[in-house]
Image (cartoon, rainbow, N blue to C red):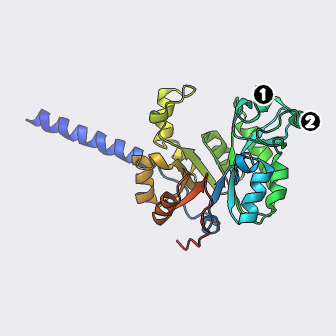
């Protein structure tokens, strides 16, 4: 009986330690100034794009439309071969231009050779997008890493943003970006992008890494101010735990229905929307 009791105590102790380590791994940064302003906006996914109206995603016309309508915007940034920063979602340009090429291997001078489908526009540079917004509405800037370039990309983006007077935050799927922000640019509001990778199962990510990223287990290293999670997967236990235990800020992407948007916002989430033009609102949370 003594051996059984001892074994039970050992198991209980191990379970308690494991639970403690799990909860510790989910601890974000808290009370970073600036979130109150960011949460009072709705964000157009890749700008207020509409191909039927000649405004491709991540184009200057889509960003102008977002600003003119009074919305913030989410956008994607890549580091090019010459050190310039391009605003485009995919590394492979086939989908958005019809021409197979990798954005990281191009220079700014080459961009006119890759017009965006559905318009005469080309892929914009980050500084040109910043000029469109000029501080009028806020930005969610997503950093798209490639080939281990997280430090170089982060430094290049922050160099451009160092003279920008508008409201912004920075997010990435890559925890290395958040670690760079934490170490070098601690005043910047930073967010961890994620979803249930066990469901989506991207082939480029190993199963252990998919598990860690889905469950936000790098949080103790990156200390994000917010979690930007695919709204479809927001019932994920680690996200729910972070919200209930630590009160972490939540951003939901990508919302394509106005009723869903209202529902998510009523639950405290900031929304990134696409495919419709919502009303404006004042979020007094």
Badge 1 or badge 2: first in the primary sequence: 1
Mark seen at residue 236: none
Q: Nearer the viewer, residue 20 or 149?
A: 149
Q: Secondary structure at mark 2?
A: helix
Could you tell me which residue is drawn at 70 percent across and 62 percent down?
138
109 to the left or right of 54: right
The quarter holding residue 7 reads: top left
Above or below for 14 versus 264? above
Above or below for 114 versus 221? above
Q: Nearer the viewer, residue 206 or 111?
A: 111
Farthest-out residue, right: 109
220 to the left or right of 177: left
In which quadrant of the rendered image does the N terminus lie? top left
Mark 1: give few (<14), some (14-19) or many (20+) Cα within 10 Å.
some
Q: Position of residue 180 (x, y in %)?
A: 68, 44
Above or below for 220 versus 32? above
Could you tell me which residue is drawn at 18 percent across and 38 percent down?
8
Q: Position of residue 84 (x, y in %)?
A: 85, 40
Q: Which residue is mark 1?
A: 99
């Amino acid at each position: 009986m003594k051996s059984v009791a001892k074994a039970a105590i050992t198991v209980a102790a191990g379970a308690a330690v494991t639970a403690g380590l799990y909860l510790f791994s989910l601890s974000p940064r808290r009370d970073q100034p600036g979130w109150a302003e960011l949460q009072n906006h709705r964000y157009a996914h890749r700008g207020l794009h509409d191909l039927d109206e000649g405004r491709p995603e991540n184009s200057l016309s889509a960003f102008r439309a977002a600003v003119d309508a009074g919305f913030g915007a989410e956008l994607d940034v890549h580091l090019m071969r010459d050190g310039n920063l391009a605003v485009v979602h995919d590394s492979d340009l086939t989908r958005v231009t019809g021409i197979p090429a990798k954005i990281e291997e191009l220079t700014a001078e080459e961009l006119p050779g890759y017009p965006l489908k559905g318009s005469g526009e080309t892929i914009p540079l980050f500084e040109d997008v910043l000029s469109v917004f000029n501080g009028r509405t806020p930005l969610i800037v997503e950093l798209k890493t490639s080939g281990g370039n997280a430090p170089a990309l982060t430094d290049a983006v922050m160099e451009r943003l160092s003279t920008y007077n508008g409201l912004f935050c920075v997010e990435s799927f890559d925890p290395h970006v958040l670690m760079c922000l934490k170490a070098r640019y601690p005043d910047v509001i930073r967010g961890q992008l994620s979803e249930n990778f066990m469901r989506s199962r991207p082939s480029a990510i190993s199963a252990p890494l998919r598990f860690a990223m889905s469950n936000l287990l790098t949080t103790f290293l990156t200390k994000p101010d917010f979690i930007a999670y695919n709204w479809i997967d927001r019932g994920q236990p680690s996200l729910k735990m972070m919200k209930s235990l630590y009160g972490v800020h939540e951003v939901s992407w990508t919302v394509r229905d106005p009723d869903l948007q209202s529902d998510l916002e009523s639950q405290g989430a900031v929304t990134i929307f696409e495919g419709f033009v919502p009303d404006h609102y004042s979020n007094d949370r």
